[in-house]
Amino acid sequence: MKSTFYDLTINIMMRMIAGKRYYSCEDEEVTERDKEEGKRFRDILYDTVSLGGEKTILVDFIPFFRWIGFEGIERRVVKLKEKREAFFQELIEQRRGFLIETGIDSNISGENERDGVRKKMTMIDVLLLLQQNEPHYYADQMIHGLMGVLLSAVTDTSAGTTEWAMSLLLNNPPVLKKAQAEIDIQVGQERLMNESDLAKLPYLHAIIVETLRLYPAGPLLVPHESSADCVIGGYHIPRGTMLLVNLWAIQNDPKLWDEPNKFKPERFEGIEGGNRDGFMLMPFGTGRRGCPGEGLAMRLVGLALGSLIQCFEWDRLNGEEMVDMTEGTGLALPRAQPLEAKCRPRANMPSLLAQIV
């Protein structure tokens, strides 16, 4: 399931960023150039993931490790960055050519005959149009950085959250049935659910929030730095100290949560936005330094998970044997073993599914 969720997330992000689809594409009209481009992109992603482990993080956070044998990792990171930057620049030049070819680059508003083209504009297109008025701010290098952040911050975290959510649902069939019933009532079985339906599915939202409570994609959040001397829990923290928030411990604290180790989406029913008092729950951080991709991630996971629940009946691979919920190593809290499950289309879904094949 993880590889499928990952491919889905990558495709969604690349369609948004550059209008590309690089995974599981069987379209006969795909050119050899596009296939080669897709292979390069997948190789870059594979190298990024393989270098994104704890050793790389240790080098970044603890410079001492540079002196005891991790220099090779740094050299590989530099080479990977060069490959990634060259690839991103090619995508930018392709979209720049598209804007020139369509004439949108000369006028970004008010021409109805271009509406059809404008609807197909990507994130790169929008940034290139903004670049015309503010070339120093919207430089190509800034666009590179934004593309890299979106791909690295959204894809693996969203895919991992969806995998954990499915794992929890397979181990809790009554919750799965309740979510399925909610979708049948609010969406029906005559059409596939879409993004606008998410606001009408509070129980599905509660399932995602409860998953993020138990298995946050960033259990230590991102590093912060104290801007001034302060005292926290009786400890003096000097200005400039790197600070890590143990979010997992907060969200699994029995002093704050009733039966914290149990999967209970009902604890978030009736709570606006799934929020809790104070800082008990903050899987995306909080305040002005909170994750800017929260809205995108919640929609992406919600639509993917909701569609799977609406369209298929799900069973554990080994019948009555529970899904193993062991956590793997790494700072992103992955599963130790990729999730495998059995599914079959629900009775009246084959005709709907045939429309998207």
Image (cartoon, helix red, strand yellow):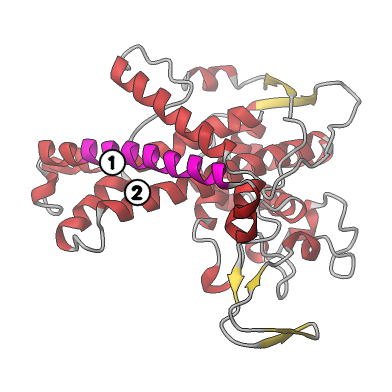
Can you say whether 234 is above or below 279 in the image? below
Can residue 304 be seen here?
Answer: yes
Question: Which residues make up the magenta segment?
Answer: 71-95
Q: CA distance from mark 1 to mark 2?
A: 7 Å
The front one of 355 and 336 is 336
Mark linked to residue 334:
none
Secondary structure beneath dot 1 equals helix
Query: Which x, y percent locates residue 94?
Result: 22, 35
Secondary structure beneath dot 2 equals helix
Query: Which residue is tagged 2?
Result: 144
Query: Which x, y percent locates residue 356?
Result: 47, 22
Identify the residue at horizontal 39%, vertical 47% (top origin): 147
Query: Which residue is tagged 1?
Result: 89
Q: Quadrant of residue 240?
A: bottom right
- Packing grade of label 2 (10 A; few <14, some 14-19, many >=20) is some
Amino acid type, residue under disc 1 in the picture: Gln
Mark 1 or mark 2: whose residue is earlier in sequence: 1
Does the magenta portion include 77?
A: yes
Q: Quadrant of residue 242?
A: bottom right
